[in-house]
Amino acid sequence: MTSPLRRVLAVDDDPDILMVVRMALENVGGLTVACCGSGREALGVAPGFAPDLVLLDVMMPDLDGPATLKALRGLPGLGGVAAVFLTAKVQPDEVTRYREAGIADVVTKPFDPMTLAATLRRIWDRVQGGGS
Amino acid sequence: MFRAPPTHTLFFPRPGICYNEFMRPLLLPWPRGASEPGAPAAASSAVALPEAPAPAAPFPAGLLAAFLLSVLLLVLWGVRQLRTARRRTREAEVANQGLLDEVADHHRTMEQLTRHASELERTLNSMRTEARIVFSLLNSIGDGVVVTDPDGKTLLFNPEAERLLGQWGGDTSSGGWPASFGLYRVDAVTPFPPEEVPFVRALRGEEVDHVEMFIRLPNAGEGCWVNAGAKPLRDAKGAIQGAVMVLRDVTEYKRAERMKDEFVSVVSHELRTPLTAIKGALGLILGGVTGELPAQTRAMLDVANRNSDRLMALINDILDIQKIETGRMVFRREPVDLKRVVEQAIEANGAYARGFGVGIALAGSVDGARALGDADRLGQVLANLLSNAVKFSPPGGQVEVDLSRTAGGVRVSVTDHGPGIPESFRPRVFQKFAQADASDTRQKGGTGLGLSISKAIVERMGGRIGFESVPNERTTFYFELPVEDRA
């Protein structure tokens, strides 16, 4: 039995994009969102927030998206957390590399804020249903 | 007066000289008082002659006849001998003339040989000069030159070839080149197949151009990229006698190209990031998330949103061009249902067309036509053709899309009824940043890259792209692809 997507942890080093993401997911999508400006911040927030899904920028200083995800999944209770990369770098070889990091999907920048929540719900449902 | 000589005198042509039977001149004393025939007696005393003997008793007649016969025989014998001598002389003269001719021939031959030797010497000197020039060139040019025999054994390595390849390749078999010289494909990782080394291909009769290889010498530093070409060396009958391979060091060019790629990639990414925020914010406002908008505010935000779309399209197109030019655009190769791709493209671009008051209609179709390629890239081509057709259609106009069979393939065409393409612009239609009118980019909103990208994509899928235009009547852009029919 699948549970609906409720809590999303958004991680991006660009505060403007983070603001758009929050509004798109909260105001349009009705989701509960926690926003972090870096991977390291996300590692501190995630255990307490207990996200269903993590929306991660790929290119970030210090810890990039794949490194942040790996570290998050090493935390108690977050070993199987679903993850989606939000990135402008979507060359086929890059997407292949992201998938090897164990993500559910990639959302391309720029994204449509009016449909972002719906896109994440579709991915979540697929992951919950055991699809790839 | 005639008298018998004391010896065998035969005749006297003038006083004092007579000839014997052997035609030897014989000085004969003239009788005292005798006069030369026809000369006065007083003048004939040049030589004093002894007193004439007393007249002898007359000869008997028989003896005289015998004597005369002897004389006659002697004369006849002498004449014969004379003729024989003359004949032999002539023969000797003829024989001598042959010898003389032969000597002259030899002389002429010698002269010719001397002349040929001189010419040969001049030719040799000229060849030596040319050889010196060629070797000077080979030693001084910036390209590596390798010459091999028909078996691939190295005959010549100029200094640049030795620098690039790190060693003289005399003993390396053609199949051993990739391992011996550390040849890799342009990615600097994949070992270069021995059978594809340019001079090996040339030995098979191919003329090879622009093959990029990476050379990483064993125990050497960074390595270098080379652009290689090779041609077979043939004799007069066309038989392959070897191959010549030319290697050009393009390492600096590659480094500059890589820097440019990285620059474009970084700039594009850095441009996309703020655009993502701008588009996201505009999208939320225009989507009503922040509340109702006054009409004028909405109109202005539409302008901002439209232009951020345009900027994003330009960035995407520049990235695509960069990927195409560097061979990094990835194409899937799978059966594509062309009718489905066309229908999806019409649907996807419908809203854009409606914004211009233009309709898109499928005029003709072919069921089951499949091409081997990348559906997303074909969708990109169709989006380019459709957006162009829409932009140049008059308001209220119609764009027609047609899918039809051709010999061995299928044609997808997009027709508009706009002003057409000026004759002067037609040769540049598929060039980058080409616009018939410089103001088109601003007026029509295109990047000037769409058709160039479309051409590259279609050609990568083994097809071709073209157009037909009748001024103020219609313009049709089309592309043709080989079809993979399923039974």
Image (cartoon, coloured by chain):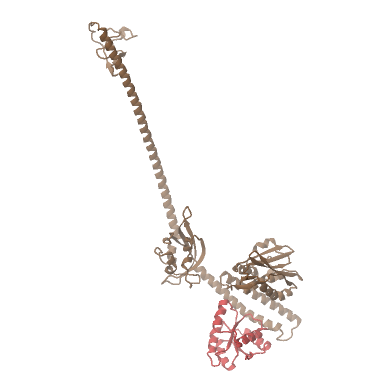
Q: What color does chain A have in the rendering?
A: red
Q: Pick the quarter of the image with the N terminus of chain B.
A: top left
- For image coordinates 34% across by 24% down, the residue present is B86
- For image coordinates 72% across by 86% down, the residue present is B291
* Percent of width and height locating residue B14: 32, 13
State the image quarter where residue A27 is shown. Answer: bottom right
Determine whether, in the image, residue A123 is placed left or right of residue B165. Answer: right
- For image coordinates 42% across by 71% down, the residue present is B218
Q: What color does chain B have in the rendering?
A: brown
Residue found farthest to the front: B487
Say if residue B295 shows up in the picture: yes
| Rendered view: B150 above or below A11 | above
| Rendered view: A105 above or below B336 | below
| Rendered view: B148 above or below A66 | above
Closer to us: A123 or B126: A123
* Percent of width and height locating residue B369: 65, 70
